[in-house]
Image (cartoon, coloured by chain):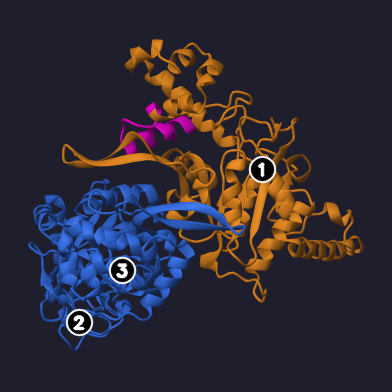
Chain colours: A orange, B blue
Amino acid sequence: MAWRNAFFQMRRCAILSAFAALPMLLSVPALAQAPATDALPSWNDTATKTAIVTFVERVTQQGSPDLVPPPERIATFDNDGTLGAEQPIYFQLAFALDRVKALAALHPEWKDKEPFASLLKGDLKGALAGGEAAIFEIITVTHSGMTTDEFETIVRYWITTAKHPVTGRLYAEMVYQPMLELLAYPRGNGFKTFIVSGGGIDFMRVFAERVYGVPPEQVVGSSGKLNFELRDGKPILMKLPELNFNDDKTGKPVGIQMHIGRHPIAAFGNSDGDLQMLEWAKGGGGVRFALLVHHTDAEREWAYDRSSSIGKLDKALDTALAMGWTVVDMKNDWKTIFPFGSK
Amino acid sequence: MAWRNAFFQMRRCAILSAFAALPMLLSVPALAQAPATDALPSWNDTATKTAIVTFVERVTQQGSPDLVPPPERIATFDNDGTLGAEQPIYFQLAFALDRVKALAALHPEWKDKEPFASLLKGDLKGALAGGEAAIFEIITVTHSGMTTDEFETIVRYWITTAKHPVTGRLYAEMVYQPMLELLAYPRGNGFKTFIVSGGGIDFMRVFAERVYGVPPEQVVGSSGKLNFELRDGKPILMKLPELNFNDDKTGKPVGIQMHIGRHPIAAFGNSDGDLQMLEWAKGGGGVRFALLVHHTDAEREWAYDRSSSIGKLDKALDTALAMGWTVVDMKNDWKTIFPFGSK
């Protein structure tokens, strides 16, 4: 991908040169001045922003040799850590923990059964000591045994009430302002934007529609099996306590193919769980874009990467650096973090 | 659903009354005259057409008490027998049979192994004597062992060359002109149209985009499992010989929830395999529409229903009649069958 880097460098130079002429017309330094139609106002004018704008212009501007027809302008976005905060706990796990508390009265046996016993005593660390198996059990009991419509109602209520443990803000506010702009910018240029999350699809859909303006049919996620039944003559879909699909790592390109049936031309992630999605997007031939959000801002958000238990970014970062993918340095590339400011 | 029927009757009367005034203005009988903006010109002016138009107007016209916001205007269409001919053989099975012939040289063992041995001798009946297991084996060997991109290329070529055994027309021409209009009409009124087929999703996507103008991400279908791999550093998705999802009968509402995540407000089918999809659409609350295509025209197409091995329509027809769903009488409701005429 060396030619691509060279191209971006050339474009960057051209754009910087063009800006260099602006001070004659403007009373403030040109490089600090966003163009009048800046679609990414929360992004600093760094190489990252230039790479994004250059890509979108290359594939959408009439006359460009790299023009991509609108139906093929598919962009896929991971959720946790890419579009919003995932520290100190994935927000769907926060939802599941709240549900365990709400359901405890119906499950007296949980008092003596891990991971529930620890959870109900407020010992999150003890509850999660069982690792992925414990998390899977918590997710399963809180995401099954009800209809899809009932589950949607529960999630809809939770999203409007549950608060982040560090900031005290609604989870719906814990999303990155620069990434909201990065959803809207390609969308305004004929892209269809999809969320491709390791989180549960029924949960993500409620959140994605409300917070990102992404409709349910443009959400790909993990899922449990469903069973169609007639209850008193009314059709329902019961959520079963059985995994159907794990939309993570190699599952992400599979989920993309199952749901979308096209190669994305751009993909956005932040962790090793997104590596294959970015590889899949880049492997489609033609001009393609892959971006990783690197959490480098301990003050305004959180700083973590290679050794983090949540959102581990190790192999994907090496690949991005080797292949010349775009890596967001959150601390330097973003003017603001959350719509309300920072942590 | 009696109130719904009563309502449609009332609306029909109102519309007929309105038309009754037309002869004063027009030189031909009003009921034989389509309105200037007729979106369904291949439909006769029967109660079926009125029911369709009444539904679309109720949920889309400004000021209607039943107005549905555009994002919720989801319509799902079965393919085989609903949008195009499925006699004398499902067209995806025709594809699979052609593939068996093409692949035979690579599989010398097929000479002595059913269902392939019979197939290669041209004995279709003998090959299908093994029932669903035989069909499953034929579909499996012809739909796996290659990448998704390779499969797409094969289907794309087949669709532009394979001819229907009775009419000698391309399969892409064996679609119903009235149903092409019935895809375009709601779409022109803010609906998003989805194909929900028992056929394989990767196969249907190629066909749906080319013939119906439905993009790949709006196709739901049966699928095999996929495996993400890097082949010489290039990412691929291998199609595995293992069923992932059967999008038929109770699988259709499940597939709709997995892919779309909303209740359709209108669903269109033709066989018992579509019953649960129509029940799911009707069960969503509010004004909903369910339509069955009844194959009643032996001369221009094929006539079959309760005892047919292909496209059996028995329990779904009883349900439709009992619930007052709309049933297309192909012989009387359709002016033309195929874009080129009839069988």
* Boundaries of the magenta span: A141-159
Q: Position of residue B86 (x, y in %)?
A: 22, 70
The crowd level at tag 1 (other Cα within 10 Å; few <14, some 14-19, many 20+) is some
Q: Quick one: A146 or B7, which is closer to the camera?
A: A146
Residue picked out by circle 2: B166
Chain letter for mark 3, please.
B
Q: Position of residue B281 (x, y in %)?
A: 26, 51
| Left or right for A311, reference B342 | right
Residue picked out by circle 3: B96
Q: Quick one: A52 or B48, which is closer to the camera?
A: A52
In the picture shown, does residue B265 fall above or below B108?
A: above
Chain letter for mark 2, please.
B
Q: Position of residue B141 (x, y in %)?
A: 34, 62
Q: Give, as a three-letter code, the residue at label 2.
A: Val
Q: Quick one: B319 or B189, which is closer to the camera?
A: B319
Residue at 47 percent of width and 67 percent of height = B150
User: Which quadrant of the view contains residue A232?
Assistant: top left
Residue picked out by circle 1: A315
User: Which quadrant of the view contains residue A64?
Assistant: bottom right
Question: How far separated are the C-alphas under marks 2 and 1?
Answer: 57 Å
Instruction: Give the structural element (helix, strand or loop) at label 1.
Output: helix
The crowd level at tag 2 (other Cα within 10 Å; few <14, some 14-19, many 20+) is few
